[in-house]
Image: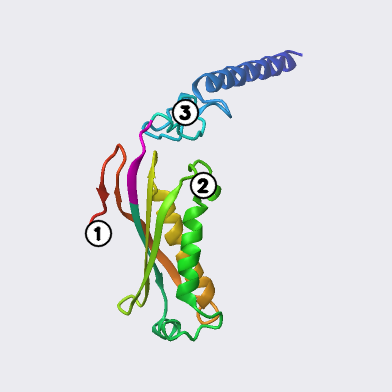
Amino acid sequence: MAKAKMAKAKMAKAKMAKAKAAAKTQKTSPKRGAPLAKRGAPSGLSHIDQSGRANMVDVSGKAPTERMALAEGKVIMAKETLDKVIAGNAMKGDVLGAARLAGIMAAKHTHGLIPLCHPLPITKVEIDIFPEHSLPGFLVHAMVKVTGKTGVEMEALTAVSIACLTIYDMAKAIEKSMRIEGIRLLEKTGGKSGPYKADGA
């Protein structure tokens, strides 16, 4: 009997210790679903509100200004693939023409692809594709302009990404090991934050 009582007492103490530990963990750890702001959300993120939720930035109080963004990307491929694309011998036809059109369309539809982007009255989209034998492959540039209340960096980056993907799609029958690399913002002008130029651009 004495042994049974001692065993019960030990079990009761163990349960109490577990309950105390669980209570302490609840006090010190963030609850599942708690707002990011209460967990120490990074500051300076314009698309995160005070409660830590994603939101579209209110630009209604800004004055429209002329803005420009330039982005670049690379499609790396074998020399033989590059030569066939330049010669127009890809099975799907005009690779570079299709890529230019795809990039322009992508810039115009960026707000439908990136959830918190504003729809913008884009005034200019220019896609330039340069064959680079040193890669070997293609260097793709996308330049976007707007007179508006927010910038077009995402439009330029989306345009160059889709242009590169289209080159891959058009030439994948020749080579499936092509790589898309180096997508980045090269330059932007206008807006409150002022001009930006990437290192080496």
Determine contact: label 3, label 2, CB under 8 Å. no
- The amino acid pointed to by label 1 is Ala
- The amino acid pointed to by label 2 is His
Whether residue 189 appears in this view of the structure is yes
Where's residue 29, x and y in %? 51, 25
Residue 111 has which mark?
Answer: 2
Cα distance in 3D space between marks 2 and 1: 27 Å
Q: Is residue 112 above or below residue 131?
A: above
Place residue 21 in its image quadrant.
Answer: top right
> 10 left or right of 138?
right
* Residue at 37% across, 31% down: 43
How many C-alpha atoms fall within 10 Å of the one at disc 3: few (<14), some, or many (≥20)?
A: some
Where's residue 36, x and y in %? 49, 29
Residue position marked by numbered label 1 in the rendering? 201
In this view, the residue in front, 75 or 93, is 93
| Scheme of colours in the image | rainbow
Residue position marked by numbered label 3 in the rendering? 49
Badge nearest the viewer, 2 or 1:
2
Mark 2 or 1, nearer chain start: 2
Where's residue 45, x and y in %? 40, 35
In this view, the residue in front, 129 or 54, is 129
